[in-house]
Amino acid sequence: MLLFLSVPQPRPPGARTRAGAARVARWRRLRLQQLRRLRGLLRGLRGRPGIGSRRRGRMALCGQAAGAASLPSELIVHIFSFLSASDRLRASASCSHWRECLFYPALWPQLRICLRVSPAEQPRLEFLMRKCGWFVRELRVEFAAENYLSGGGGPGDGGSADAGTGGEEVEALQLSTRWLEVLRTYLELVLCVLVSIRNNRNLQKFSLFGDISVLQQQGSLSNTYLSKVDPDGKKIKQIQQLFEEILSNSRQLKWLSCGFMLEIVTPTSLSSLSNSIANTMEHLSLLDNNISGNSTLITAAELERFVNLRSLALDFCDFTAEMTRVLTDNNHVPLQRLSLLVHNVSVMHKSLDNMPNDEHWKALSRKSTSLRVYIMAFDIKSEDMLKILKPSIPLERIHFDSYITCVSGAIVDLISRQYDKFLTHFILMNDVIDTSGFPDLSDNRNEDPLVLLAWRCTKLSLLAIHGYTVWAHNLIAIARLRGSDLKVLEVTEESIDFDQGELADQDVDPVHNLIEQVSLGLGQPWHAVMDIESLSVFTEPNRHFYREMQSFSEDI
């Protein structure tokens, strides 16, 4: 600082003219004031040494108080952009100014929420949607209903009931109370989401998933409980009107996905979309097996407006031969992803007579050479599956989930022969109550259909099995055939069985030998699935299919 003070001052401009004399005097006075202020700061620093004094001196040199709270909002938002969502929340707790910058629109272009259907979630959801609902560009909401059907732990649980008829009546009453509360909370949460985005014109991706499987009896929702929660149907109508209002107000919507939601989509919902938005839509997913009668959520005539559609997900009974004609039209861009849900409820109420035949699939494959199909089958009989599985379907993924019916070995053999060039994912789940004897797919022990599947389908990368007998030596053969190309091999422990010869050999532990041989074949450590509850594909098949469908459609 002393060197700075001893530097000779430059000659003021205009010093030789009379007009410049006043400017020179004014310039010198300003310089003198600056020097006096600087000398005063130096005396303060010398007279009050220490860390705190030096910090106060530096702040005074800046001319204002310095600190995190004095940073401009633009800089705080820029800092937040490098942080994860959890780190942003922690950083926003530093002061009120940072907290105000937390919900800046540029920081939340997408919002993905997974909600338990619980009253405790409602105030949190209302706060978040009030802050972000009006500007968010990508919104994905999943409603996860707690399993109140299990014993204890649910709302209204009054403890264990007495044995006998009286105990059963009390248990039924408690179960009814839980269902009513779940339904009531579910409707309130859905309303909260839809109300907050009704005027959002920036929305580009909108995805809703409602886990209503826990609210179903034999695959269909009990109207008795719904009529008690919403006797006049006002909330359901309000939800449907809000959904149509969101579609009509949208200006940039490219992705619309609604799966297993409770009567939110009606056959007239898509008519709310303007032609300009329908023409630019790239993904459309409408999955709801609770639509009664022969009504469908979308018709072939309505599909003609979606000329830019690249990904589509529908109930299989809604995907008709007329739709394939629309998708093969020259005005339509090639479809690249098609996800189909085959549900026993839909098959019971709707006919399979209008489904595409093999010629329709051939025409669609010629139009869309990169088309890949994903099929999810819930409790479908083997004779119906034989009708559905046409040879020309470019099937890449198939998921069987059974409660009553079982998949036969003939179906697995048909899949391995017809789709050997495309199949990458094969999931076989059977939720049987009696685990003492699982169905065996192989009629001939020398030609197991699962081994043939691994041998024929050269692109197979995921195989998951539960509820069907898988022999240990066949599992070793599958691992050796596919090798490291089989990225995921999930087989539950109770599904694995051993030959009597393997069990009789006292020198070799059959379980240890199985783990060692399969790991050696796959080229990576492998263990059987010990806890079936850890498999989301088993515990939550609807959610698993919906998430896989989303990633399947996004991977274009």
Image (cartoon, helix red, strand yellow):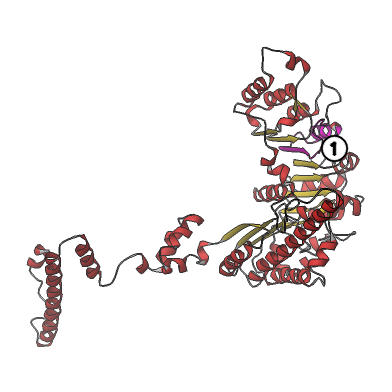
Determine if the magenta segment contains residue 426: yes
| Residue closer to the observer: 166 or 374 | 166
Q: Residue at x 87, y 51 (%)?
A: 165
Q: Residue at x 75, y 21 (%)?
A: 498
Task: Identify whether 463 is placed above or below 199.
Answer: above
Is 483 on the left or on the right of 71, as rendered?
right
Mark 1 is surrounded, within 10 Å at the Cα level, by few (under 14), some (14 to 19) or many (20 or more) other residues, namely many
Q: Position of residue 63 (x, y in %)?
A: 25, 72
Is 88 on the left or on the right of 515, as rendered?
left
Read off the residue under disc 1: 406
**Callout 1 secondary element:** loop
| Residue closer to the observer: 413 or 417 | 413
| Residue closer to the observer: 64 or 8 | 64
Task: Identify whether 10 is placed above or below 281.
Answer: below
Q: Which residues are magenta?
A: 410-438
Q: How many numbered callouts?
A: 1
Q: Position of residue 512 (x, y in %)?
A: 64, 21
